[in-house]
Image (cartoon, grey):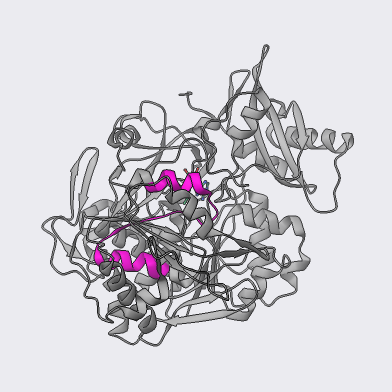
């Protein structure tokens, strides 16, 4: 690992409207945080009391480094928190899910309807022999039945493993085999950009390599309905139609597994992250409620697919536990045109909008005229997740989408953390480029390789010092890999990201540690150079890598995509180099700039620098199963 190093900090700041602070769920971040630090167990105890449990915990946490248990011996079912308790109260007829298809079709499920669907499907799964602890793989398009399937598994204590519907047969087979799943739930097709994705065909191919799968449940969408293979397949609709309507929730121990989810693999092979029922429910409930400041009449839209952790925590479990109205769509942001998302915001009156920098940069690339055509005035809170939100992208999001009115919560977290860990709580001053401070409930720091905090302005490793409720409990089938997260830097969970703090304790993520570039002895994080490039008016997106150089050790090579209407030229290249020099100094100037039509990304939208690097150096790129087509 590299030593710590100096980082140049941007100094811009937005002061929030004082009203949003006064009304926020956490009106005083500093006070809430110190309350947490004074007594972490009492803090989480108080939050956990807001959920419904079958029995109390003996202890809030048990910390046996690096293994944690939360809400020891307590019993619950996450679905009674997401469904039953709303249905029993005034939210029975409140929309739980509003789904929009690619052609504009719409379906709404109230909490009462979702509850019924989940119970029926849960009974359907039971009739196929699924029992508590069995693994069920879900490979579906973004339709309400995907959410139903996840919750139905949780209802009966089956461990779901959702595989993103954009993956191919081999990636699906690898995940099924790793989790040893018994049932696969899929659909005949998904629809994407006017094309049909043959999910069932892909699933069939995968299942030929997965001896553990006993049955495949198929949701049939096409007309006329495809023929079902009775030896292997079960029709989703008949399964639910035949099932009893009432399904009492399985009583789960807080530490029973809830799901396995494979990481997006931007820097290495995917790992099966295991999350448990109790702590995960508490962590996602608390962060959804407080970070997004959810209110009773909000219309909440997180654009992530449930194939990723953001979809698990902030499309399904957190928002439903809070009891909000969740928007989901099978559509993509620029189909049939780049106004697709903004039309949906206008039509449904979305108030909380949570998306990824890759999408924001894509919108910027298409220009301001698209969002300007729509009424976005219902928006109240904007969120970002997945990659550093470059200052340039922050500004655009803040002004063009939020109309200069909405706080932006740039949330740093991981599949492994299960919930938000760093952000700028609503009402706190916002600094473009900085995710913010640790949320109340998380102890996050920037340290050197021995675990000592580095001073402000010095880059280091982003670590988490204390256990938190929704932390992963292990890596499925590879506990050694789990321990490695906690054994790399003494006393800390190592996130694998590089970061820097400023004098106020705000944290800026400067890239993945694996992607660090050392030029003539200087450590350079990828995000710094990429942000500098993106702040040039011609640039839409940028990725940088280090290339070995006999003199400097490494030089920087940049890959750049341009905004619509701009073409590459030698003048532009020179101008870009000059632009980086001006903002970061000569050491960060790319020695080479290559223009590309698009950058290699994971299917969840993260730039895969190691693919660029491997191509550049003629090396093996390693596991590329998560690379976008
Ligand atoms: C939630 C999610 C985790 C990695 C993480 C970091 C990057 C996520 C970020 C961010 C800068 C943010 N990341 N959020 N970087 N600012 N707000 O994305 O989980 O797919 O496991 O990825 O994503 O590098 O370590 P996951």
275 or 10, nearer to the observer: 275
Image position of 53 with respect to 435: above or below: below
Q: Is 165 on the left-hand or right-hand side of 337?
A: left
- Dividing the picture into quadrants, the one containing residue 122 is bottom left
- Dividing the picture into quadrants, the one containing residue 400 is bottom right
Residue appearing at x 41%, y 71% in the figure: 236
Image position of 249 with respect to 541: above or below: below
Would you say the magenta stretch is mainly helix, strand or loop?
Answer: helix
Q: Quadrant of the N terminus?
A: top left
Q: Residue furthest left?
A: 58
Image position of 536 with respect to 378: above or below: above
Residue appearing at x 48%, y 62% in the figure: 140
Q: Range of the magenta residues?
A: 147-176
Give percent across and percent down for residue 350: 56, 75
Look at the image and tell me whether residue 273 can be seen. Answer: yes
Q: Residue furthest top?
A: 550
Give percent across and percent down for residue 156: 25, 66
203 or 80, nearer to the observer: 203
Asked whether residue 123 is drawn in magenta, I would say no
């Amino acid at each position: 690992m590299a030593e710590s190093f100096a980082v140049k900090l941007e100094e811009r700041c937005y002061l929030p409207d004082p009203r949003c602070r006064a009304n926020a769920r956490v009106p005083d971040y500093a006070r809430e945080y110190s309350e947490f630090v004074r007594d972490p167990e009492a803090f989480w105890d108080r939050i956990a009391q807001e959920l419904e449990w079958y029995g109390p915990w003996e202890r809030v946490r048990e910390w046996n480094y690096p293994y944690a248990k939360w809400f020891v011996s307590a019993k619950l079912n996450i679905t009674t928190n997401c469904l039953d308790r709303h249905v029993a109260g005034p939210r029975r007829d409140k929309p739980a899910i509003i789904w929009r298809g690619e052609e504009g079709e719409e379906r709404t499920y109230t909490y009462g309807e979702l509850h019924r669907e989940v119970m029926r499907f849960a009974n359907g799964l039971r009739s196929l022999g699924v029992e508590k602890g069995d693994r069920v793989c879900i490979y579906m398009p973004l339709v309400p039945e995907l959410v139903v399937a996840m919750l139905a598994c949780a209802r009966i204590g089956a461990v779901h493993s959702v595989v993103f519907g954009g993956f191919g047969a081999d990636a699906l087979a690898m995940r099924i085999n790793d989790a040893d799943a018994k049932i696969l739930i899929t659909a005949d097709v998904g629809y994407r950009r006017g094309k049909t994705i043959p999910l069932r065909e892909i699933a069939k191919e995968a299942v030929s390599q997965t001896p553990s799968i006993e049955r495949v449940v198929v949701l049939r969408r096409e007309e006329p309905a495809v023929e079902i293979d009775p030896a292997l397949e079960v029709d989703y609709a008949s399964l639910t139609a035949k099932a009893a309507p009432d399904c009492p929730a399985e009583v789960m121990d807080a530490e029973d597994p809830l799901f396995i989810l494979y990481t997006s693999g931007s820097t290495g092979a995917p790992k099966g992250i295991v999350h448990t029922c109790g702590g995960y429910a508490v962590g996602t409930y608390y962060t959804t409620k407080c970070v997004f400041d959810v209110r009773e009449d909000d219309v909440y839209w997180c654009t992530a697919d449930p194939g990723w952790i953001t979809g698990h925590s902030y499309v399904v479990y957190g928002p439903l536990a809070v009891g909000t109205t969740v928007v989901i769509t099978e559509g993509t942001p620029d189909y049939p045109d780049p106004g697709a998302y903004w039309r949906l915001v206008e039509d449904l009156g979305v108030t909380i909008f949570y998306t990824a920098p890759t999408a924001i940069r894509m919108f910027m690339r298409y220009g301001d005229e698209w969002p300007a055509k729509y009424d976005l005035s219902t928006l109240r809170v904007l969120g970002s997740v997945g990659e550093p939100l470059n200052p340039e992208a922050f500004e655009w999001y803040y002004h063009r989408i939020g109309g200069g009115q909405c706080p932006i919560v740039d949330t740093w977290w991981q599949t492994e953390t299960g919930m938000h860990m760093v952000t700028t709580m609503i009402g706190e001053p916002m600094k473009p480029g900085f995710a913010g401070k640790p949320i109340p409930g998380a102890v996050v720091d920037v340290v050197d390789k021995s675990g000592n905090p580095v001073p402000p302005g010095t880059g280091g490793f982003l670590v988490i010092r204390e256990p938190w409720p929704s932390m992963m409990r292990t890596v499925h089938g590879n506990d050694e890999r789990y321990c490695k997260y906690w054994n790399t830097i003494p006393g800390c969970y190592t996130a694998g990201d590089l970061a820097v703090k400023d004098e106020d304790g705000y944290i800026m993520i400067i890239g993945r540690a694996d992607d660090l570039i050392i030029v003539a002895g200087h450590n350079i994080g990828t995000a710094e150079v990429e942000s500098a490039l993106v702040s040039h008016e011609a640039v839409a997106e940028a990725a940088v890598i280090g290339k070995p150089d006999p003199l400097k050790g490494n030089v920087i090579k940049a890959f750049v995509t341009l905004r619509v209407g701009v073409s590459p030229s030698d003048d532009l290249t020179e101008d870009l180099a000059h632009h980086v020099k001006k903002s970061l100094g000569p050491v960060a100037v790319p020695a080479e700039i290559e223009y590309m039509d698009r950058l290699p990304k994971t299917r969840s939208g993260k730039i895969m620098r190691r693919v660029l690097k491997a191509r550049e150096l003629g090396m093996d790129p390693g596991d590329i199963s998560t690379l976008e087509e």
